[in-house]
Image (cartoon, rainbow, N blue to C red):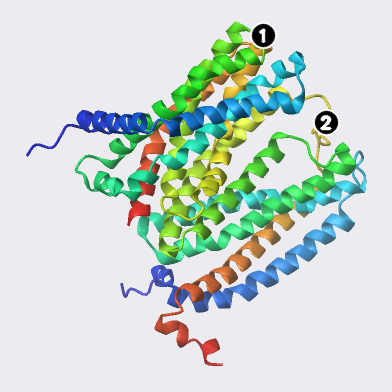
Amino acid sequence: MNAPSSGAVFRGIVRRDLRLAARRRSEPLFTLGFFVVVASLFPLGLGPEPELLRRIAPGVLWVAALLASMLALGRMFAADYEDGTLEQIVLAPSPLVLSVGAKIVAHWLVSGLPLVLVSPLLALQYGLPADVIAHLALSLLVGTPVLSLIGAIAAALTIGVRGAGVLVALLTLPLYVPALVFGAGAVDAKLAGLSAAPNLALLGACLALALLFAPLATATAIRISLE
Amino acid sequence: MTNGVIHWFRYASPQSFYPLAGRMIPWFATLAALLTAAGLWIGFFVAPTDAQQGESYRIIFVHVPASWMSMFLYVVMAGWAGLGLAFNTRLSAMMAHAIAPTGAMFAFLSLWTGALWGRPTWGTYWVWDARLTSELVLLFLYLGYMALHAAIDDPRRGDRAAAVLALVGVINVPIIYFSVQWWNTLHQGASVSLTRAPSMAATMLTGMLVMALAFWMYSIAAALARVRAIMLEREAHMQWTHELPEAAK
């Protein structure tokens, strides 16, 4: 029997995870709903002054997206661990790093990309101008994969651990600091009439680093959790 | 392996390291006490009063060494954790586990003394300055490490999982520090100026270095004492723990 090619394994896992998400639509929608609700609560807490809302919008929307993507991390490996799929993925002849990468991609498509697509709508509610909205979506487009990649390490470390949800939050939030700073900084800079390019470039650098290291660390963490 | 060289790897086993650690602790503890006394004496009586900040600056002799130690200990902890992960040695992982609380304590001490120092000099306990913020994030990293270790029941799995986290953290610490600094330059209002007196008196520097050495010695003593406790706890089922002289009492 021929072993399937790496590309086939990658596509297979992505397709499987997307199909699973499509069959159980409520969970990805929870993430999106959480993002919208958190972003809508801030004006209620802070008052409706348009000037104030516009100034805090980049930070608020970025923090809301960060929390929403963190909430989704619990789903990344937990179900596969419980029904034994994760063990089969580890035992499969294809490299684990590749399978883990596919799972992260699928996770981002389900829980990260929707945040990017909805963010312009929320930004409109905060009264941001059009070019700033475009930069917000762009910064989230570069930044949410970083969140998924770093989060995957924490999700893998806490597989089958008591109180994994709170623990994942404690582990990921400090590591999310650079993405938050550069992401919100890019939008802030645009809002202040400066170029967003330096922050976006640094965010891209974070993404490149995370792409390199996070799947390796996640694969190691999964092996440790399953032994 | 019988060429008269000290067999360092012999001490990689808890059984032979336990008595060695026990013999080393008094030395490091004594050094820590002497150096602390010397450092505080320099800090309180030898170092001159600061022209701008008066006497309140003297907390620098605790604050700065504590910050140094908190950062240094994280790297040391990650080093032990990496060794444990790479070579699967029991003792390395125990050392990493033993260092974490001391590192977290220094991070907390640094934040606390920073707040006490900030009140008289800047007029506020807390500013979102780059250094303070990255120190806070470092404290969170320590807490995450300890929480992950505590949440996993099997200590060997806990060691390895926490080791991965420590290594991820040590790659991230420079990025976090840099990002926070970048963030700060964009957001910083003109409320607080952090520039210190341009030149630092030599005695002040000496005091700080002596205190840093004292904290270093204290960290070694504390980590060794803690690693002894961890060894006993984990190896309580082994023969050697029951043959210890203190077990006979």
Amino acid type at mark 1: Gly
Q: Image quadrant of residue B176? A: top right
Q: Residue at x 54, y 69 (%)?
A: B227
Asked if both marks, 2 and 1, belong to the same chain, the answer given is: no
Image quadrant in which the N terminus of chain B is located: bottom left
Is residue A179 in view? no
Q: Residue A214 placed where, x, y %?
A: 41, 37
Which residue matches tag 2? B192
Q: Residue A33 placed where, x, y %?
A: 53, 28
Graded by Cα atoms within 10 Å as few (under 14), some (14 to 19) or many (20 or more), the crowding at tag 2 reads: few
Amino acid type at mark 2: Val
Q: Residue at x 68, y 54 (%)?
A: B106
Chain at numbered mark 2? B
Q: Residue at x 45, y 54 (%)?
A: A161
Instruction: Give the camera-side residue of B12 and B114.
Output: B114
Instruction: Give the camera-side residue of B69 and A94.
Output: A94
| Residue mark closest to the camera, 2 vs 1 | 1
Q: Image quadrant of residue A67? A: top right
B55 vs B232, left or right, is right
Give the residue at the far left of this rendering. A1
Give the numbered dot on residue A193: 1
